[in-house]
Image (cartoon, rainbow, N blue to C red):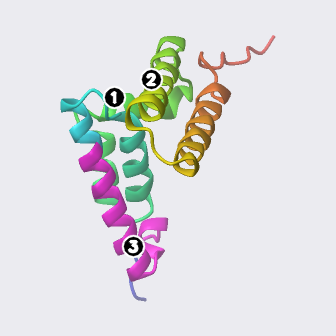
Amino acid sequence: MPPDPEPTTAATRAAPARRLLLLALGWTAFALGAIGLLLPIVPTTPFMLVALWAFSASSERFHRWLYTHRLFGPPLQKWQRDRAIPVWVKAIALGSMAVSLAWLAFVVRPPRYALLAAAALVAAGAAFVLRIPSRPRQPVREP
């Protein structure tokens, strides 16, 4: 009797072209997140979340590497465990979005359609941030 094949996962079942696109997306997001460590205007964690997702669908090895990374792993593990954004992080995110949009409107002064598009993106980002709980859910205790 032949040995059982290795178990298939989402990463190993992905079509080769899709897998390569997801790997490219993962590494691009990782690079942007790493840049965020040096430039305070670029966020780190959202890019790392995208990278983790892309790696989860394309490479178990890179997913495991990023998830257990000594610098990037703990925030990713905390997000997976708690699925919450602390109030102070929400305040910084919303404030940064508002300042960026104001800078775009009053300093850059793009065409009206570009400003409306940017405002729509900021509104979508703000809605996403605001819909996430601020505290981890408390486990329900059995009586």
Residue 19 is tagged as 3
Label 1, label 3: how many angstroms apart (C-alpha)? 26 Å
Q: Nearer the viewer, residue 104 or 50?
A: 104
Label 2, label 1: how many angstroms apart (C-alpha)? 29 Å
Residue bounds of the magenta highlight: 7-32
Q: Amino acid at mark 1?
A: Pro
Q: Amino acid at mark 2?
A: Val
Label 2, label 3: how many angstroms apart (C-alpha)? 37 Å
Please name the residue that numbered disc 2 is placed on: 99
The percent position of residue 133, horizontal first and vertical second, equals: 64, 22
* Residue 21 in the figure: left or right of residue 120: left
* Residue 127 in the figure: left or right of residue 3: right
In the rendered structure, are the residues bearing label 1 and label 3 in contact, judged by CB atoms less than 8 Å apart? no
Circle 3: element type: helix
Residue 74 is tagged as 1
Main secondary structure of the magenta stretch:
helix
* Residue 66 in the figure: left or right of residue 129: left
> Can see residue 59?
no
Q: Amino acid at mark 3?
A: Arg
Query: Mark 1 vs mark 3: which is more N-terminal?
Result: 3
Reply above or below: 69 against 57: above
Can residue 31 be found in the magenta stretch?
yes
